[in-house]
Amino acid sequence: MSVALTRRPGLGRLKAARAPLHLTCLGFAALLVLAALLASWLAPYDPNAVDLGNALAGPSPDHLLGVDAAGRDTLSRLLLGARTSLLGPLGVVAFSTVAGVLVGLAAGWRGGWLDSVLSRSTELVFAFPGMLLAILIVSVYGEGLLAPVIALAIAYLPYVSRLTRSLVLAERTRPYVAAYQVQGHSAVQICLRHVLPNIAPVVLAQSAVNFGYALMDLAGLSFLGLGVPALTPDWGRMVFDGQTAIQHGYPLSAILPCVLIVLTVVAFNVVGERWADQVARRTP
């Protein structure tokens, strides 16, 4: 007697619906990166050119997205602001991923007292919220992009190290590790040549999600005046500068960077989670 297996009717449609969303977010992220790289050629005006006689003017053929309270072209500042708004999170993700993978790899592979020391050390970082740590460091070293990036990278490091440690613990039990050990391969060779490439897709997927959160945190610091200098185009700083325009009934210069921040965070989260789902389905 044979039993016919029926497919759940909603599951296929759900997966099919997620594919266009993933491709849309991936395309938006790629377009955003391209716009940031070509911002100097795409921006129609100097982003810091002040024209007080044209302040708070709405969209027009000369200024497609209007100007802010200082008469600066909003489109130009959005394009140039994409550079700092994306460069900062990239630094956070790069540093936290490299350092977190090294810490998690050492803790998960060696175990014992080294695992205990590294695990307890990373847990201490959880006691300090990333924004609070960034505010403390910026208050010491002054405004700029470097101090918040370092602070947030330290705050994000424990998330990467914990994920890496759990993945390494699972990889250590696989037969290929024992086979390489029998063949005389060193722990460094096994980790770098075999374990690390196997766990890299999951770590990179998490890094894509972390990128969106880091962008939001850095934008919040810039909004508080603790990020980039005042004259540097940045989405978070534009929201802060746009408060005056909102009070006068011209919210466009503040709403547009907010929309870009939200869309960018959503796009990178969707791409990262989709990547993680694909890795999970391929893992036996």
Image: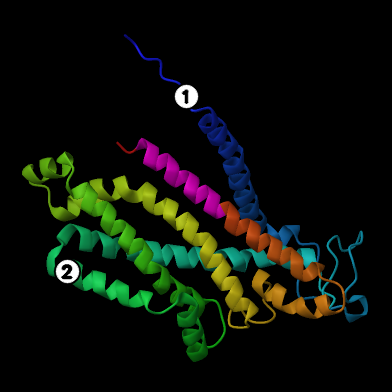
Mark 2–mark 1 distance (CA, rounded to whole Å): 48 Å
Going from N to C along the chain, the mark reached first, 2 or 1, is 1
Q: Quadrant of residue 260?
A: bottom right
Residue 241 position (above or below residue 115):
below
Q: Which segment did they paint magenta?
A: 268-282
In-image side of 137 versus 165 (left or right): right
Q: Residues within 10 Å of mark 2 (few under 14, many from 20)?
A: some
In-image side of 204 versus 119 (left or right): right
Extreme residue in the bottom direction: 140
Q: Which residue is mark 2?
A: 114
Instruction: Tell me which amino acid carries mark 2.
Output: Leu
Residue 168 position (above or below residue 127):
above
The picture places residue 22, in percent across and down from the top left corner, at: 57, 43
Identify the secondary structure beneath mark 2.
helix
The picture places residue 215, in percent across and down from the top left corner, at: 56, 66
Q: Which residue is mark 1?
A: 7
Q: Residue at x 67, y 67 (%)?
A: 81
Foreground residue, 113 or 72?
A: 113
Residue 269 position (above or below residue 235):
above
